[in-house]
Image (cartoon, rainbow, N blue to C red):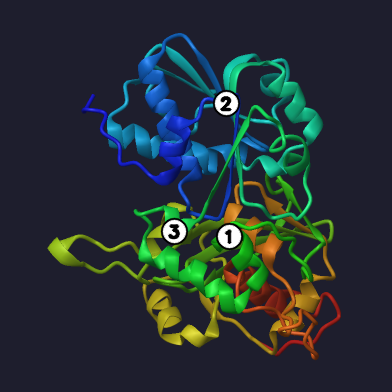
Amino acid sequence: MSQLVMRHSKILDELLDSEKRIVVLEGGSSSTKTWSLLQWIIINCSQHRKEVYTIARLKMTWTRATVLKDFESLWIKYDLPITPEFNANRADQVYYLFDNELSFIGLDEPLKAHGRRQDYLWLNEGMEDSEKEVNQLMIRTRKRIFIDYNPAAEVHWIYDNIISREDCDFFHSTMRDNPFLEQAIIDELNRLEKTDPIAYKIYNLGLRAQQKGLIFKNWDTVPDIPVNATMIAYGLDFGYVNDPTSFGSLSIFEGELYVDELFYERGLVNVPIRGRGGVIEKNISDRMRDVNVLSGYEVIADSAEMKSIGELYAIGWNMKPAYKPSIVFGIDILLRYKIHITERSLNTIKEFRNYKWATDKEGEPLRPEKPIDDWNHSIDWIRYIAVLRLAQRSGGITRKN
């Protein structure tokens, strides 16, 4: 193991100074809440032995995709002597570090979550959890409890019944407390000030606010797509530096839609090209191969990017330009269906939670209605497929192909 030397953020320093039983970390996105808590756990494990840590989020799929992914990065970065060797695909995510047990769980796994006893409990994105379930976990925690979240509500039981306790330390943070943040993320969070003031307040400034005027209320999450569902098409929304490239599939089963996000990533060029040092740059074509895109299925992509569509078509992908009569037209089609999003589609879920109708400076809806130009990378490709392949089926009119 390499020498354990960590770069400290404001939050890590606050965690190291805190001695109270409960610590609440409230703040904006990318403020190092998750990273710093993992650093604290590693430091604490190096100083104590035979203690038990439970790290939980509402769904195990989300635990794997967020906090467990960061733990893997720290394992590599610090060459941590964990056993067994890290494997995110293993059913039980239990590791041992300096003779301490670290269990990563989902609260949707009742056999693992209920009745557990631990020395330390960490509830990642704690606003997702019910007060009753959290109380059961807290009374089985011998030493300390940590809760972190983005404050996407104006009223919540954590504000009233946890932060108000005398044995609770409360720390607030924003991206400005993260000296290591990439400029592309800073730019995107700053852009919210013009495109979505409420989201700017929540995710940039880390202040409490409730999203209003949300467009989609006809959706939920599911573990997976039914085996008998029919694939409609793949969808692709191009991005590069400031915006991510979003790619996924849309399926239908018993008249309801199923969305599966397959990748959502910045910095992708279209096709394999050699960059500096002769290394192949990250690209959309290779990512589609990585997620095992089914041969012959259409990939419906933004028609404003005809050059990009042409490049991918030229190397064998079945690309189809989107037909875009209007954004509202596509939204109207999607509102006619029940939409199920796979639990692993974290970025798409976040978009559906934040996509809303635009308002004027007084907060009044614009007329005619139009959506904000944000939280729409996955929603755009879902809309492209809906217009091109579902409009006739749901009573709309589309062009002939």
Report how many numbered discs are placed on residues in the image: 3
Q: Residues within 10 Å of mark 2 (few under 14, many from 20)?
A: some
Indicate the amino acid at tag 3. Arg
Q: Which of marks 2 and 3 is in front?
A: 2
Question: Dot 1 corresponds to which residue?
Answer: 203
What is the C-alpha distance between the residues marked 2 and 1?
27 Å
Q: Which of marks 2 and 1 is in front?
A: 2
CB under 8 Å between discs 3 and 1 = no
What is the C-alpha distance between the residues marked 2 and 3?
25 Å
| Circle 3: element type | helix
Residue at x 62%, y 43% (from the top left corner): 125
Residue at x 16%, y 65% (from the top left corner): 276
Indicate the amino acid at tag 2. Lys
What numbered label is drawn on residue 356? Answer: none
Which residue occupies the extreme left position in the image?
277
Q: Is residue 357 above or below residue 368?
A: above
| Circle 1: element type | helix
Indicate the amino acid at tag 1. Tyr
| The C terminus, quarter of image | bottom right
- Across and down, in percent, residue 182 comes to 36, 60
- Across and down, in percent, residue 245 comes to 47, 67
Residue 234 visible in the shown view: no
What is the C-alpha distance between the residues marked 3 and 1?
12 Å
